[in-house]
Amino acid sequence: PPTDPIGCPTAQAVAGATSLQELQLAIQGCLACPLGPGRLKFVFGEGDPLARLMFVGEGPGRDEDLQGRPFVGKAGELLDKMIGAIGLKREDVYIGNIVKCRPPDNRTPTPEEARACLGYLHRQIELIRPTVIVTLGATPLRELVGVSEGITRVRGQWKRVVVGNREIPVMPTFHPAYVLRQYTQDVRRAVWEDLKAAKEWVDKAQEG
Ligand code: URA
């Protein structure tokens, strides 16, 4: 795939990708930000390419960096359970991240790193055309949706994001790693209610 002199895929290569596979091929060698040289594996995202429901997390952790797949560690186990609680399987949805390479020590990606990767996520969303996006934690809400309020305040409140001329409803909820740290009934119920609302929207859109 065409790249510029420092190894970044060209904007045309990204925009011109007509399938997720083509997009992955175009961007998996990316060196557009400082995270690229430090990765073991590029974590593109995975799931049903026609998913109605898309989850967006923050970025790969250690397990994801080793395996090249999103949400396969402890947080991923919980995410699978959360998806199961609304009657779906992991294969029924699409799971992606704000950044596709692991930040060192699992720190939050910087705004520059997020920005360097955002065009890839946008193209991914354009190709998948999900009915609803669920953001997991504060980082995807801030970097994809532009909402910087505290996640505890805004979770459960519908937001929207415009990607490629399409407006997509966004349901912000807690990150599963946060749920693991705050394993209270209140937090678990909140996430369940958020995902239930997202699933209801998807089902309603399916009927209409
Ligand atoms: N946390 C994330 O935000 N994304 C992953 O893929 C794994 C853990």
Image (tube, rainbow, N blue to C red):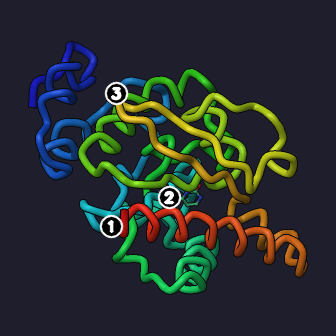
Label 3 vs 1, first from the N-terminus: 1
Q: Residue at x 61, y 36 (%)?
A: 109
Residue 180 picture quarter: bottom right
Q: Does 183 sit left or right of 67 as displayed? A: right
Judge the density around disc 2: few (<14), some (14-19), many (≥20) Cα neighbours within 10 Å. many
Q: Residue at x 56, y 38 (%)?
A: 160
Residue 150: percent from left, percent from top: 84, 41
Q: Nearer the viewer, residue 186 or 26?
A: 186
Residue 41 shows in this picture? no
**Which secondary structure lies at badge 1?**
strand
In which quadrant of the rendered image does the N terminus lie? top left
Label 3 vs 2, first from the N-terminus: 2
Instruction: Mark 3 and mark 1 in contact? Answer it, CB < 8 Å.
Output: no
Label 1 vs 2, first from the N-terminus: 1
Q: Which residue is mark 2?
A: 55
Q: Residue at x 54, y 49 (%)?
A: 59
**Which secondary structure lies at badge 3?**
loop
What is the three-letter code of the residue carrying label 3? Asn
Judge the density around disc 3: few (<14), some (14-19), many (≥20) Cα neighbours within 10 Å. few
Judge the density around disc 1: few (<14), some (14-19), many (≥20) Cα neighbours within 10 Å. some
Residue 161 shows in this picture? yes
Cα–Cα gap, marks 3 and 2:
20 Å
Cα–Cα gap, marks 3 and 1:
23 Å
Residue 15: percent from left, percent from top: 19, 27
Q: Residue 165 bears which disc, if any?
A: 3
Residue 117: percent from left, percent from top: 42, 31
Q: Which residue is mark 1?
A: 47
